[in-house]
Image (cartoon, grey):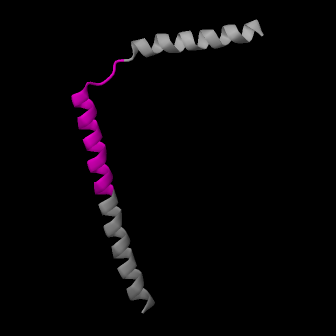
Amino acid sequence: MPALVAKIKDYFTGSISEMKKVVWPSKKQTIRYSLIVIVLSIATAVFFGILDYAFNLGLEQIIK
């Protein structure tokens, strides 16, 4: 049992040590990257929406 406690302690000690080494992005970078993700997500959704609409029209023409 003491070995398990020691392993858990080592895990959290290592995790804390690694978190201190992380270089976090600035607020400006975080906002910029978030906006890029949002814009690209919307653009992708619009693209696939148009593609879906076009295929739907094409299939309706084939079925008639």
From what the image shows, is residue 41 above or below residue 19? Answer: below
Q: Quadrant of residue 14?
A: top right
Quadrant holding the C terminus: bottom left
Classified by dominant secondary structure, the portion drawn in magenta counts as helix
Quadrant holding the N terminus: top right
Residue at 39% from the left image edge and 78% from the top image edge: 56
Give the x, y percent position of residue 34: 29, 39
From what the image shows, is residue 39 above or below residue 53? Answer: above
Residue at 32% from the left image edge and 56% from the top image edge: 44
Of 25 and 52, nearer the camera is: 25
Q: Quadrant of residue 10?
A: top right
Q: Write down the region rendered in magenta.
A: 23-44
17 left or right of 10 in image: left
2 left or right of 14 in image: right
Residue at 26% from the left image edge and 49% from the top image edge: 39
Give the x, y percent position of residue 45: 34, 59
